[in-house]
Amino acid sequence: MIRALPLLALALVACGKTPAAQQDLNSLDAELTNGASNARDPALTAALADQIMVDPTLAQSSNGNAVRPPPRPVSGAVPPDGVAARTDPTDPATLKKAPAASNDCPECKAAKGALTLGALAERQANRRTAACADAIGYSAGWANRLPADLPLYPDARLSEAAGADQNGCRLRVVSFVSSANVDRLLDFYYTKANAAGYSAGHRTDGAQHVLGGTRGEDAYVVYVTARKGGGSDVDLVSNAGI
C-alpha cells in the first residue's frame, strides 16, 4: 500500500487533474491578478478603479507653503546706516559754546593707538583713571552707570561699553554714534561739565576733537570725530561713575 500512493498521484496528474492545494494557489493568483477579491467590496473596487478627480481651480495651490526661488536675484545692497537722517533732539539754544580748540593734542595721539576701550582708559593722563584700566570689564550695562552729570547724548547709539567698580574704581568708558555734528556734541558736554563744576579744555588735531577736565579727583574726557556722511563717533571716559 505504501508504494501504491505515489502511483495513484501520478495517475491523477497524468489524467489532467490538479491537486486541491494547487487549485487553491491558482485561485489566489487569479484573485490578486484580476481583482476578483476586490469585487467582493464595491467601495474598495471603486476607489482603486475609478479615475482620479482633479479640480483645475486648485491645481496651482499644490505645495502652497513650499520654499520657492525668489522672483529676482538677491540684492547685495547694504541698508543705509541712517545716523545722519535722525533728528537731533537737543535744542542748541540751551547749550553753551565750548572753548576754542588748541591744535596741540597729545590726547589725540594717545587715542589713535588704543584699539580697545581698556587701552583707551589705560592711556589717560589722569592717574586715577589709568590705574583702574586693569580691572575693566565689558558690558552694555556700564553705559547706564555713567555719572548723571555726564550722560550719553540723547540720540546715542551705543557701540560698546566697559567699566570697573573695585578697589576704589568707578571707571566708565563708552563708545557711541550720534546724528549730531562735532560742534553740537562738544557744546553739549561742555555745558554739562561746566554745570557740574568740572573744568574744560578743548584740543584737536584737525580730525579728532578732545574735550576734558577735572573736578577734584574726578575726571572726564570726550573724544569726538566726524563720520563720513554725517554724524559723529564719540568715546566718553569718566572715573566718577555711579
Image: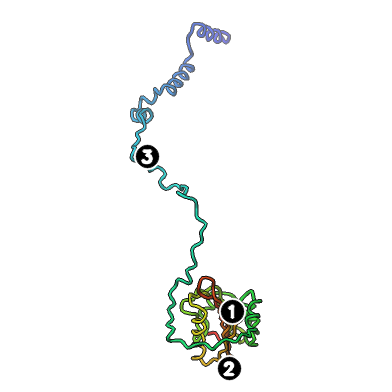
Residue plotted at (34% across, 30% down): 43
The label nearer to you, 3 versus 1, is 1
Tell me where residue 46 appears, x and y as whole percent: 34, 29
Q: How many numbered marks, from 0 up? A: 3
**Which is nearer the eye, 192 or 26?**
192
178 vs 27: above or below: below
Residue plotted at (38% across, 41% down): 60
In the picture, measured across the screen, residue 127 lies left or right of residue 70, that is: right
Q: Which mark is residue 147?
A: none
Q: Give how far apart the Cα atoms at labels 2 and 1 are.
A: 26 Å
44 vs 64: above or below: above
For mark 2, what is the residue? 216
The label nearer to you, 2 versus 1, is 1
Residue 109 lies in what quarter of the image? Answer: bottom right
In the picture, measured across the screen, residue 86 lies left or right of residue 140, that is: left
Residue 198 lies in what quarter of the image? Answer: bottom right
**Which is nearer the eye, 164 or 119?**
119
Q: Are marks 3 and 2 in contact (CB under 8 Å)?
A: no
Tell me where residue 158 appears, x and y as whole percent: 52, 74
Dot 2 lies on which element?
A: loop
Tell me where residue 151 appears, x and y as whole percent: 50, 82
53 vs 217: above or below: above
Q: Are marks 2 and 1 in contact (CB under 8 Å)?
A: no
How packed is label 2: few (under 14 Cα within 10 Å), some, or many (20 or more)? few
For mark 1, what is the residue? 208
Say whether disc 3 or disc 1 marks the residue closer to the N-terminus. Answer: 3
Residue plotted at (35% across, 35% down): 54
Q: Give how far apart the Cα atoms at labels 3 and 1 are.
A: 65 Å
Dot 3 lies on which element?
A: helix
205 vs 12: above or below: below
Dot 1 lies on which element?
A: strand
For mark 3, what is the residue? 59
